[in-house]
Image (cartoon, grey):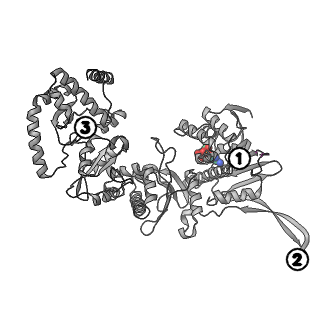
Amino acid sequence: MSVETKQFQAEVKEILDLMVHSLYSHKEIFLRELVSNASDALDKLRYEEAKNADLATSGDEKYIRLIPNKDGKTLTVQDNGIGMTEDEVLSNIGTIARSGTKEFLKKAKEAQNSPELIGQFGVGFYSSFMVADKVRLETEKAGSQERIIWESTGDGSFTIEKIPATGKQGTAITLSLKTFEDDESAQNFADEWTLKSTIKKYSDFIEFPIKMEVTKEEPELDDEGNAIEGKTKTTIEDETLNSRKAIWLREPKDVKDEEYNEFYKHVTHDWTEPVERVFYKAEGSQEFRALMFIPSKQPMDYNYRDAKWGLSLYVNRVFIMDNCEELLPPHLRFIKGVIEANDLSLNVSREILQKDRQILAIKKALSSKILKTLKTLLTKEREKYEGIWQNFGSTIKEGIANDFANKAKLEELALFHSNETEKLTTLKEYVERMKDGQKEIYYITGESLKQVECSPYLEKLKQKNYEVLFCVDPVDEWVLQSITKFDEKDLRSITKEGLELDSEEEKKQKEEELKSKEEEYKSLLRTIQGAVAENVKEVKLSPRLVDSPCCLVSGAYDPSARMERMMESMGQSMPKSKRIMEINPDHPVFTRMQGLAEDKQKEWAEILYNQALLTEGSPIEDPMKFSKQIANLMSEA
Ligand code: ADP
């Protein structure tokens, strides 16, 4: 049979290069990756068998086998799982299909400088090249006519060869082990003890037996069964190295934290420990068990648009699918883990899952269990909860707008920045701090804490000592709009019209003052209105401001300026709603303006409008003109 030589995809070359030169000290993770692939391959085969009982492989015991060869310095990891066709080898092993490959590479390269990070990447098969200078993969797909041999030394190319099938499906990966002569701590992966302890550490819960022939030295016995001194005999026994129990089926009291954490790392490829785990066992009309985790940081691909999420689904210990999005609502997409639901059929498909009533019930149960856990953390372990919120709060918040049934619970879970506390606050805590006479809950949305902190909209509230929530997450625009009331108090955006902070008496007095000022400024206001009419629907005097001359506010039912900017950046431009320009009648600039000629008044009005845009974080249309106008002003001063 002919041997073909092919080039790796450029990205794979880079990954391989990183692996070959890796300084990562936990090189043993390659074994976890290979065993995990083997286990997936066995899962896939069992799934095929479950759907088609006539498959020839059905009766065979499924196993993974480690075959170390000390003299030949090789290690083989073999499985009798589903195997791969030539096409599958080419597309799975020679390319990286995942989304965000570039980003991935960039981070992987950064991690090369801090090698302890390399473990997070789940680089899978390629991690073999940390310990091997040549890798040979021999594989046969169940039912196929050919067997594929793939080989590479981790440089730019690999070879692929086809030979006739043997009728034994599965995959064997043989590593020619590197010798790390100048590194005394380097492990020898052809050594039985090293392999045993590595499997225990990383792969103990793998459901299929991981077998290895182990050499046992035993004292030789005489006829009466007594040990003969100085004489031993060597026997070889087949040993299963892992305990094999599906961890989610064990009672939590019997499982150590480390075991859970290892399992978490196996399912997520995360290298850090989860901050929280949630175990749920449902009995009665519907039986299922779920073992879920909250990661301690955002996964690397978390913010990619097509990042996969969801639990791994098992039915009767048969792996059905991973990334099962149907079992959790999207705002809990950071939750990782497994669920086993034995009432479902093995043939369950995504289409069925989307409509299945049982699935809906499970989803509801899991969702409330998680919300309950979060609530407990909020009340009992605030610091931990705040950490979770920093990572996943903006995701959880989406539920307030989307999950009507749990809206109230989610509102209680939400944390906000505010001008009054260093720490994050809940709405409930905000309400407890509300001042006498304060009727509403105030918030401001904006790009950054820095920007909202010095916003002119805050001036009056600061003067009144009212607390304002700072909402600087992009989702806040939607989320806050959907919380109309909390604890009977209205939520009010301080950048929109209709903000009333004064008592009835103060209001009356202000109104009178404003009326007389309006009279005084009548023609000036008309001129300003004329100058900015294109973007502003109304110019009016307002008691909102203290130090700033003016600001732009949105109509109570119009989208905020930031919402418009966000929609625009997503390519969904909406008709621009005209804003209201509110003017601080006590600001000296207007007294000055009164005395100017009309064309000067117009120019100043434009400057004031642009300044208002800048302070709210919006771009100005013609920065060139604006700078010129300012320069003119300065030279005239
Ligand atoms: P990952 O496991 O993260 O998908 P890998 O690079 O480890 O990435 O593997 C790529 C793909 O190659 C796997 O998804 C699987 O389809 C295939 N594969 C790897 N090892 C095996 C194996 N032992 N048996 C069958 N298929 C395998």
In front: 340, or 377? 377
Q: Residue at x 18, y 29 (%)?
A: 592
* Residue under label 2: 226
Foreground mark, 3 or 1? 3
For label 1, being within 8 Å of ligand 1 is answered yes
For label 2, being within 8 Å of ligand 1 is answered no
Instruction: Find residue 548 and name its label.
Output: 3
Q: Callout 2, which amino acid?
A: Asn
The question of residue 589 being in magenta is answered with: no
Task: Report the Cα–Cα distance between label 2 and label 3.
Answer: 99 Å
Residue 569: which quarter of the image? top left
Q: Quadrant of the N terminus?
A: top right
Q: Residue at x 70, y 31 (%)?
A: 5
Q: Residue at x 43, y 70 (%)?
A: 284
Residue 519: which quarter of the image? top left
Residue 15: which quarter of the image? top right
Give how far across and how far down residue 33 sits, in percent: 64, 50
Give how far across and how far down residue 442 sits, in percent: 26, 50
Q: Where are the magenta residues, as a range?
A: 177-185
Give how far across and how far down residue 464 sits, in percent: 23, 50
